[in-house]
Image (cartoon, rainbow, N blue to C red):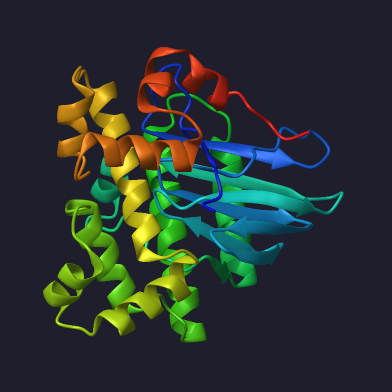
Amino acid sequence: MTERVLFQSFLPTQGRPRAYVWKYSQAIGGRRPRHFHAEPEMNLIVAGSATFGVGDRVVEASAGDLLAFPPGQDHALLVASPDLYLFAAGMEPAFSSEVLSAERESVALPLRVKLETADFAALARRAADVVDRTGIEQRGAELWEHANWLGRRALGAAGRAMHVHTRRTLHIVREEPHLDLDSVARKLRAPASELSRYFHRDMSMTLVRYRTRLRLLRLIQLIDEGARNLMASAAEAGFGSYSQCHRIFQSELGCSPRQFFASGLRGRMQQVYSP
């Protein structure tokens, strides 16, 4: 059975910023349940240790680790040490692509990267300077660019970067979420089995499910932008039919599209926190 997760936007609705940084400490609490969103997100572990559920993988992280969650990838903080402290940064997808102009995938880091001590300290200082503030788009963009650059440098030293097939697949399916595995494989001129294996390894979820998430995100975006016809929007989002859209929406989010958009359920879902 498909595990249900919540759709919870990373960016605050008030003021509609394109970038935001917030802090989490175990002492303060306010933990989100397993969720996904359209914004790419990065977490910098400043102190303590934590266990995250990311897709179908459990990821252990500690001070100095940088975690990256591309759009649509579900994640949750499962276990935290009493001294856990982290910064979470997220950006509007188009803004992220603008900032990382050479990397259209928005975030192309693996799930977890260990930073060098000096790099970690510099990034933590920069995050502390912008955390929980409004009007931080420029500084947030600089933080985002810096974090991605440091992450890639650490990966180069460790020799374990995200596979090129995964990076290119992320770009293709974000542009064309209706494409199936075989179609993506033909575009990349790579064996479908190899592409699928590397994608699952790097993303901790199957390409099939990731495509589903992107289509859900696209449908939500279309309605948010003013589209009124659910059937037409479902087709534009890449669903084969509205009945397929309804079935997948129910399986992933536990409600129908109409319930999500018209009953206030979406707002209540956004406000859910784990005990």
Furthest residue toward front: 243
- Residue 78's place in the image compared with 181, above or below, is above
Image position, residue 163 (x, y; %): 36, 79
The residue lying at 47 percent from left, 67 percent from top is 151
The residue lying at 26 percent from left, 23 percent from top is 223
The quadrant of the image that shows the C terminus is top right
Looking at the rendering, which quadrant does residue 120 occupy?
A: bottom right
Image position, residue 249 (x, y; %): 39, 37
Image position, residue 236 (x, y; %): 15, 37
- Residue 66's place in the image compared with 97, above or below, is below
Total label count?
0
Question: Of residues 232 and 162, which is closer to you in this image?
Answer: 232
Furthest residue toward right: 82
Image position, residue 119 (x, y; %): 56, 65
The residue lying at 45 percent from left, 13 percent from top is 263
Residue 274 lies left or right of residue 3; in this view the side is right
Residue 218 seen in render: no
Question: Of residues 130 and 181, which is closer to you in this image?
Answer: 181
- Residue 89's place in the image compared with 260, above or below, is below
Looking at the rendering, which quadrant does residue 206 occupy?
A: bottom left
The residue lying at 44 percent from left, 36 percent from top is 250
- Residue 56's place in the image compared with 139, above or below, is below
Question: Of residues 239 and 157, which is closer to you in this image?
Answer: 239
Furthest residue toward top: 263
Residue 112 lies left or right of residue 31; in this view the side is left
Residue 33 seen in render: yes
Residue 203 lies left or right of residue 77; in this view the side is left
